[in-house]
Image: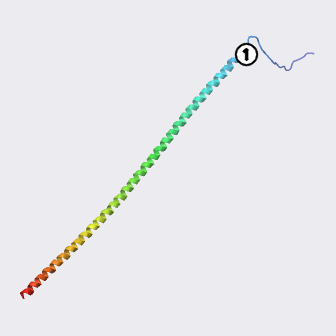
Amino acid sequence: MGSSVVSYTLKDIHDDQDYLHSLGKAPTTQVQKDSRIGEAEAKRDAGIREAKAKQEKVSAQCLGEIEMAKAQRDYELKKATYDTEVNTRSAQADLAYQLQVAKTKQQIKEQRVQVQVQVVERAQQVAVQEQEIAHQ
């Protein structure tokens, strides 16, 4: 009859020189080192992405301001063109009115001169008739 051990469990292993403990230090240190490096790289990458995002935001704001300035400039140019056209038409209307006033005044003067000429002609006719009557 023989006996065979199918399974067994070790509850504690230790040694006086801490050899087993020292075996685990190197991998643990390497894992901690890799963890710190990974964390630093992640922070660096996040900083780079944040800086790029800020740069894109500033670029977008600048482009928006440029577009607004262009729209404002176009508006001002169109407004100036319309104002010039309105002022030109207004000046033409004023000049046409003044021209018409001058023509009307000239016609009135011409009519007064004609009336005066007629008065003088009649006065001369009367004088001629009086002289004829005086000679007869």
Q: Quadrant of residue 115?
A: bottom left
Which residue appears at 44% of the width and 46% of the height? Answer: 69
Which residue appears at 53% of the width and 35% of the height? Answer: 52
Instruction: Give neighbour class at mark 1: few <14, some 14-19, many 20+ (Cα, 10 Å).
Output: few
Q: From the image, tell me which residue sits under label 1.
A: 21
Amino acid type at image mark 1 = His
What is the x, y in percent for residue 130?
A: 10, 84
| Residue closer to the observer: 87 or 38 | 87
Give the residue furthest to the bottom: 136
Instruction: Work out whether 21 lies above or below 135.
Output: above
What is the x, y in percent for residue 43?
A: 59, 29
Numbered disc total: 1
Which residue appears at 28% of the width and 67% of the height? Answer: 101
Please, what secondary structure does the residue beneath circle 1 have?
Answer: helix
| Residue closer to the observer: 90 or 71 | 90
Instruction: Work out whether 23 lies above or below 58.
Output: above
Which residue appears at 55% of the width and 32% of the height? Answer: 48
Q: Quadrant of the C terminus?
A: bottom left
Left or right placement of residue 9 versus residue 74 in this view: right
* Colour mapping: rainbow
Q: Quadrant of residue 4?
A: top right
Instruction: Work out whether 105 lies above or below 129.
Output: above
